Image (cartoon, rainbow, N blue to C red):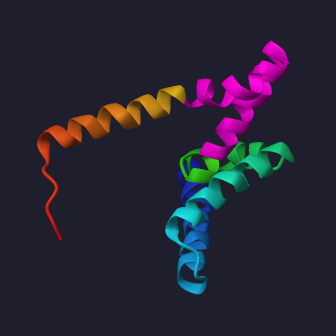
Amino acid sequence: MEYLKAFLVGGILCAVGQIFIDRTKLTPARILVGFVVGGVILSALGIYEPLADFAGAGATVPLSGFGHLLAKGVRAAVNEKGLLGIFTGGITAASGGITAAIVFAFIAALFFKPKDK
């Protein structure tokens, strides 16, 4: 049942992104930033945490989940370190994922050569 919930919620988030691509003149970059900001806002309002608990990876893997992770990290760092946590909490919380992205991108760059269009 967990797989079904993750598939449905993740699919709905992806479908929303596809609708934005098809029906608006927003660039993909702006849509992606909108998803991250939306995740932060929904997390601040207390809406995203129950969604993440319900859907698991279906809610935490998309970019809105990255926004939720940043907001959660900032909240924890502010509680622990005070005002300085605003600047350090998000990056600290997301450091594992950011590091993995850099390492895997470097490994991919070693094996593949880009081609001109």
Residue 43 higher or lower than 76, as above or below: below
Which image quadrant is residue 91 in? Answer: top right
Find residue 62 and report its horizontal and vertical position in percent. 55, 52
Let me know if residue 101 appears in the view.
yes
Find residue 98 and report its horizontal and vertical position in percent. 47, 33
Residue located 66% across and 45% down the image? 67
Residue 108 higher or lower than 83, as above or below: below
- Residue 11 highlighted magenta (yes or no): no
- On screen, residue 14 versus residue 107, left or right, reads right
Residue located 80% across and 14% down the image? 80
Find residue 82 and report its horizontal and vertical position in percent. 84, 17
Find residue 42 and report its horizontal and vertical position in percent. 79, 51
Residue 7 higher or lower than 2, as above or below: below
Residue located 76% across and 28% down the image? 86
- Residue 84 highlighted magenta (yes or no): yes
The mark tally for this picture is: 0
The stretch of residues the image draws in magenta is 66-94
Residue located 16% across and 55% down the image? 114
Let me know if residue 1 appears in the view.
no
- On screen, residue 30 versus residue 46, left or right, reads left
Which image quadrant is residue 7 in? Answer: bottom right
Q: Nearer the viewer, residue 9 or 45?
A: 45
